Image: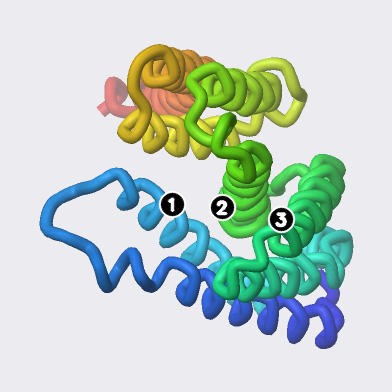
Amino acid sequence: MANLDIKIKLSNTLGTLLLIGFQGFSYSSWFFDHKEGFHGRDFIIILIGILQLLLIGMTIYQWLPKAPKDVFEAIGYWYLLIAALNSGVSILWFFHLNIFAFVGLLWQLATLFYVYHRLRDYPPRNNTDAVFVNSPFSIYTAASFFMTIWQIFQFSEETKSHPVVNTVIIIAIGFVALHLVDYSHRHDWVYALTTAWILLDAAVFLTGTPHVVSLVVVGILVSAVARALIPNWLERINSRFSRFTNRFGERTPLLGGH
């Protein structure tokens, strides 16, 4: 496959450095103030850690000859724009410029949705593409969508912790994730599993009806992910078993002749 334009490679590398740097800056207090044991925030720390590892993998993968040139060209410089927006949002949150940060968050989500939408025309050729090209954007889009919807209701004390509002948020993001894994041709189980992980984290902090609804939605999403994955796994196992039995059947007469 032809080599990717060096400008896009450098752009993606810079984007990853910006994301890792400013995400580390945003969540540094969680690490420094971390107490012993497993806590609710650890769900997000784990998710961000996985995302950063996948983004590093994507950045390295693009430099290899086998990298899908057409996919990275479709992503283009949008990834760098996402990283720049994320960096700006982190700085604005730090200085408590919440309205401006929220506007930046909206732009970031819109750009992520654009890239995520473009990737539907480039299904992964193999597991490497799926892990290091498609999965990072699925995780990032799911997390940003939840963060944006949640943040909408944080500006008012009346809606900030209202159980009805929290329940609506949970159902809304759960519905989107269920659609993408169960009804969309993409069967994006990574997006759905990311959403389930976020809602499991939310259930730790919620009480009453939102807590129950969050756990129910998590169960529905996990079931949908299982429906998306298990048939493929069974098909692969059956295919490998069939090849094994066919080879064994071809060798049996030869063994019997001796």
Q: Regarding mark 3 in the picture, which secondary structure is present there?
A: helix
User: Does label 3 or label 1 sit earlier along the sequence?
Assistant: 1
Q: Position of residue 53 (x, y in %)?
A: 47, 65
146 w.r.t. 24: above or below: above
Residue under the image location 60 percent in, 20 percent down: 168
- Callout 2 crowding tier (Cα within 10 Å): few <14, some 14–19, many ≥20: some
In this rendering, which labeled residue sits more in front, label 3 or label 1? 3
Q: Which mark is residue 102?
A: 3
User: Does label 3 or label 2 sit earlier along the sequence?
Assistant: 3
Residue under the image location 37 percent in, 54 percent down: 46
Left or right relative to 157: residue 106: right
Three-letter amino acid code of the residue under disc 3: Phe
Judging depth in this view, the residue of 55 and 46 nearest the camera is: 46
Q: Which mark is residue 131?
A: 2
Q: Which mark is residue 47?
A: 1
Three-letter amino acid code of the residue under disc 1: Leu
Judging depth in this view, the residue of 108 and 129 nearest the camera is: 108
Left or right relative to 72: residue 190: left
192 w.r.t. 19: above or below: above
28 w.r.t. 224: above or below: below
Quadrant showing the N terminus:
bottom right
Label 3, label 1: how far apart the Cα atoms are: 21 Å
